[in-house]
Image (spheres, rainbow, N blue to C red):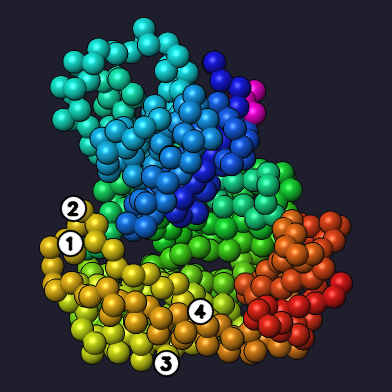
Amino acid sequence: MNFKSVAFHHFGCKVNFAEASSLSRKFKDAGVDVHDFHEQADVYVISTCVVTAVAEKKCRAAIRQAHKLNPHAKIAVIGCFSELKPDELKMMEGVDLVLGHSGKFRLLEELDKLDHPDETLAATEIRDEAMAEVGNGHDYHGGVLPEKHSDRDVFVPSFSYGDRTRSFLKIQDGCDYFCTYCTIPLARGRSRSDTVENVVKNAKEIISNGNREIILTGVNIGDFGRHHSENFSQLVHALDQVEGISRIRISSIEPDLLTNETIEFIAVSRNFLPHFHIPLQSGCNKILKAMHRKYTRELYRDRIVKIKSLMPRACIAADVIIGFPGETDDDFQETFGFLESIDISYLHVFTYSKRDNTLAARMGEPVADKVKKERSEMLHKLSLEKKRKFYLENINTEVNVLFESDNSHGFMHGFSENYIKVKTFYNPELVNRVVRVKLENIGDDGEYVTRL
């Protein structure tokens, strides 16, 4: 290898973060120094996202930033953007390597090949002819014929550790749902997952390296195990028996895949925390049907009621998309009223972004930007009200807070088991420790403040 240092930057979901962290460890094991992305490095790796047009814009900006930091560095672009629009990325100044999901786990080897052009088909005329074939599942080397891969739908385990108190453990990848607004199945392929045995093994390794909390993540984690006669409920039961683990969170899970059995088990489990992230996307059944979501708002309400009946202090977050094509004022008001009526803790609000090669790009009347902005502001305000109410419902209760290593203006932060954010004066001895705290004072910023 002719490079001694590398810097990573990831965009998008927790799956991207887990994968980038695993790749970073691979470079460290090979003797390559891993630098901060804002520092000079021999190689810059940008793990991309295409969920929205804003995400794509940020990815392009990161490429330009890396090239400006070191015009002589190699730049590798990996992930969803690379999978869907490789020819667009290869035209950007400074980009040397574009790897989609089938190739990014060979990143170290592919970077090494760039220094040995005799090992590749480097003829420009062949490249130009072949670029017409570059698309889903193909990778691009600057000046090199893209190699076709058959491993696009193979599951590759990943997890993060080393610089956080919490670790994101990837248990599943890809999606078979094909919602009309979403490009993830096009970018990441069909649903596939790890095995219960291997997830348990990785969880044990994470804990042995000092992490106190594990977040199970994936593209559609409720679909875990379907292709090899296992299921998500079996995984939850198995992880709850692992010694040494005391905090496990479930990241985003579809309401139709979050079963009553799983909810009931989490309510009495040893390790799983009362925190749920359940995408709603719309509170209007007409829009849910147009989105090709696999549930109704009635089923969603049932899940919320079930959780709160067994875990009254559970935190529940919901994703909502506003401005979907054809969403009328009445449709939005139906969503707003539904969200007001259910006992959720806060919202993640997304503005619909037209994505190429999706059904939604060709359906319904587009919603004006001004209207989308107004609806977004209404839901952000509602989210703040919901969060404030949830925090006040927990006042004078005792919680277990895992403190992280941040130091912001003399304060450090941590989260309770039900995901309430707590801050205290920075004390390095509290980093990565679980501390029993009574929730008494809410600061002007809306966070609980405690003295330890």
User: Marks 3 and 1: in contact by CB < 8 Å?
Assistant: no
Q: Which of marks 2 and 3 is in front?
A: 2
Query: Residue 361 has which mark?
Result: 1
Quarter of the image with the C terminus is bottom right
- Under tag 1, what secondary structure? helix
Q: How crowded is mark 2: few (under 14 residues within 10 Å), some or many (20 or more)?
A: some
Measured in 3D between alpha carbons, the distance from the residue under mark 4 to the one under mark 1, in whole angstroms, is 29 Å
- Residue 349 picture quarter: bottom left
Q: Residue at x 41, y 81 (%)?
A: 377
* Three-letter code for the amino acid on which mark 3 is drawn: Ser
- Residue 403 picture quarter: bottom right
Tell me if residue 65 comes above or below residue 33 in the rendering. Answer: below
User: Marks 2 and 1: in contact by CB < 8 Å?
Assistant: yes
Measured in 3D between alpha carbons, the distance from the residue under mark 4 to the one under mark 2, in whole angstroms, is 31 Å
Task: Decide if residue 430 is on the left or right side of residue 322.
Answer: right
Q: Nearer the viewer, mark 4 or mark 3?
A: 4
Q: How crowded is mark 4: few (under 14 residues within 10 Å), some or many (20 or more)?
A: many
Give the labeled residue for mark 4. 346
Viewer-nearest residue: 150 or 86:
86
Q: Which of marks 2 and 3 is nearer the N terminus?
A: 3
- Across and down, in percent, residue 92 comes to 34, 35
* Three-letter code for the amino acid on which mark 4 is drawn: Tyr
Give the labeled residue for mark 3. 341
State the extent of the magenta-drawn residues as a range. Answer: 29-33
